[in-house]
Amino acid sequence: MKKSTIIIFFMLAMLKTQAQDYFISFTGSGATTEVNTVKVDNLTSGATVTLNGGDILHLIAAVGIVSLDIADGALQIYPNPMTEQSMLTFISPESGNAVISLVDLSGKTIYQTNALLSTGRNSFRVSGMSWGMYFVKVTGKNYTCSIKLISQSNLQNQAVIEYVSSKNNTPDSPLKSVAATIDMPYTNGDQLLYKGISGIYSTVVPDVPTSSKTITFKFAACTDADNNNYSIVEIATQTWMAENLNVGVKINGVLNQTNNGIMEKYCYNDDITNCNLYGGLYMWNEMMLYVTTPGAKGICPNGWHIPTDAEWTLLGSNLGGNTVAGGKMKSTGTIEAGTGLWHTPNTGATNESGYSAFPGGYRASAGNFNALGDTDNWWSSSLNNPLNAQYRWISNAYGYLNSFGCDIYFGFSVRCVKN
C-alpha cells in the first residue's frame, strides 16, 4: 500500500473517531418530571451552556472555538490568551447599532466595525492580531463595555472582527420560551456535567457521551432547616448532596459550638462569604445534634442523614477504591489558572462522580482555621471513642480519599446521604 493511501486512511479514521453529532434530551423523575433549566459544563474543555429543560443539546466536533456561559451585560472572550482566533460573546441589553473596536495599549484603534445587534447574545470571531495586549470595546446607544485580550500570535495579518451569530436571550428573560437545539463543542472522551433544576429541586448527572441519549434527572427534596436547597447526585447505590451543608447561625471561630438549641456554624476566617462558597464548618457534636447514634439525622435535611463510616467506605469502593476516589470527587481547575477553587496541582481531579468537592479547609482550634484551597474534610457519624470520630479527607496534592480519626472538637464540612 502506498504511503499516501495509508495517510488518507489514517485521516479518515481520525475524522470518524473525532466527529460527533450527538443529540442529548432531558427529562425528570421522582419528585417532579418537569425540568426547568439545564446547565451543562464540559469539565475537559471549560465550555458551559445553559438550556431550557425542553431544549436539545447538540454535541458537535470542537474546532478550536468554545462557547462559554455569558453573564448578563458582560463580554467574554475564549480562548484568552488567543493564538490564531478567539470568540467574542456578549449580551446586548437592546437591539440597534453598536461599534466594536480593537484598541492597543497606546490607545490606538487598530480595527473598528459597526454592527446591527439583536437584543441578547451576540457572537463575533476575532482574528489576525499580532502579539500583544489589546482591549475589545463594544459601544451601543445606551451602554458600553470592554474586556482585555492577549494575543500570542506571531502572525502579521490584518486584525478582523467577523459576525458569527445572535441569540435572543435577553437579560430579563435569559432563556428562550420555545424549545430549540443548542450546539456545544465536544470531543469524544470529554467529561460533561449536567445540572438539572426544577423549582427547589436540583440534580447533577455526570456523563461521557458516546451516542445520542436522554438524560433523566432523579429529583428529590434536599432542603435544610434554613430553607436552603441543595443539589444532589446519585453515585451507584447511594444519593449524596453535591455540595457542602450550610445551615445554622455563624458564630466566631474562637467560640465552641454548644448544645443551646440553636444550629451553629463556623465560616472560614469568620467570613460569611466562605460559608456561601464552601459551606459551614461544624464540630462533631453540633453536627449530630448531641446524639451519638451512627447514621443519625443530625443537622441534615429531612430524609437525609450523617453518613456512617461504612457508608463512606462504600462510596470509595463505588468510585474504584480510595486511591483514586478522591480525584473523581474533586471539582476541576485551580486557583492559579483562574479555573477553580483548588490550589495547584489538584492532582487527579476529574469530578467524574459529580460529587463536586470544594476545598473548604477546617477549623482546628479556637479561632485557628487552616488549609482553605488545599483540603476538604467531612465527618462521619461513627465514633472511635467518646472524643474521637472517623472522617474523610481529600487534598489538592493527591487523588486519594483518606480515612482518619480526629478530635471531635475540630470543625469539618458536612455532606449528607439520602435515607
Image (cartoon, grey):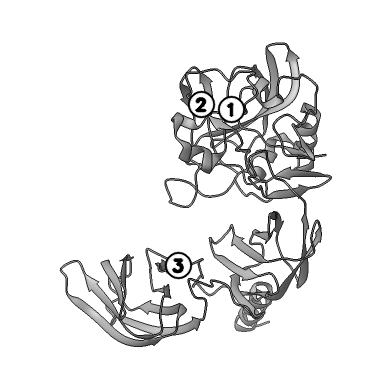
Q: Is residue 102 left or right of residue 288?
A: left
Residue 38 on image: x %, y %: 65, 65
Q: Is residue 50 left or right of residue 215?
A: left
Q: Which of pointers 2 and 3 lies earlier in the amino acid sequence?
A: 3
Q: Residue at x 19, y 66 (%)?
A: 105
Q: Which of pointers 1 and 3 lies earlier in the amino acid sequence?
A: 3
Q: Quadrant of the N terminus?
A: bottom right
Of 32 and 81, which appears nearest the observer? 32
How crowded is the residue under tag 3: few (<14 C-alpha within 10 Å), some, or many (20+)?
A: some
Residue 393 on image: x %, y %: 63, 30
Q: Residue at x 67, y 34 (%)?
A: 401
Q: Residue at x 68, y 59 (%)?
A: 199
- Disc 1 target residue: 264
Disc 2 is placed on an element classified as loop
Q: Is residue 9 left or right of residue 67?
A: right
Of 144 and 192, which appears nearest the observer? 144
Select label 1 or label 3 by which is in front. 1
Q: Residue at x 80, y 24 (%)?
A: 294
The answer for how far apart the CA atoms under marks 1 and 3 are is 35 Å
The answer for how far apart the CA atoms under marks 2 and 1 are is 6 Å
Give the amino acid at mark 2: Ile
Is mark 1 in CB contact (under 8 Å) with mark 3?
Answer: no
Residue 154 on image: x %, y %: 30, 71
Which disc, if any, is residue 72?
A: 3
Q: Quadrant of the C terminus?
A: top right
Residue 90 placement: quadrant = bottom left
Disc 3 is placed on an element classified as loop
**Residue projecting furthest to the top:** 386
- Disc 2 target residue: 251
Give the amino acid at mark 1: Glu
Residue 392 placement: quadrant = top right
Give the amino acid at mark 3: Asp
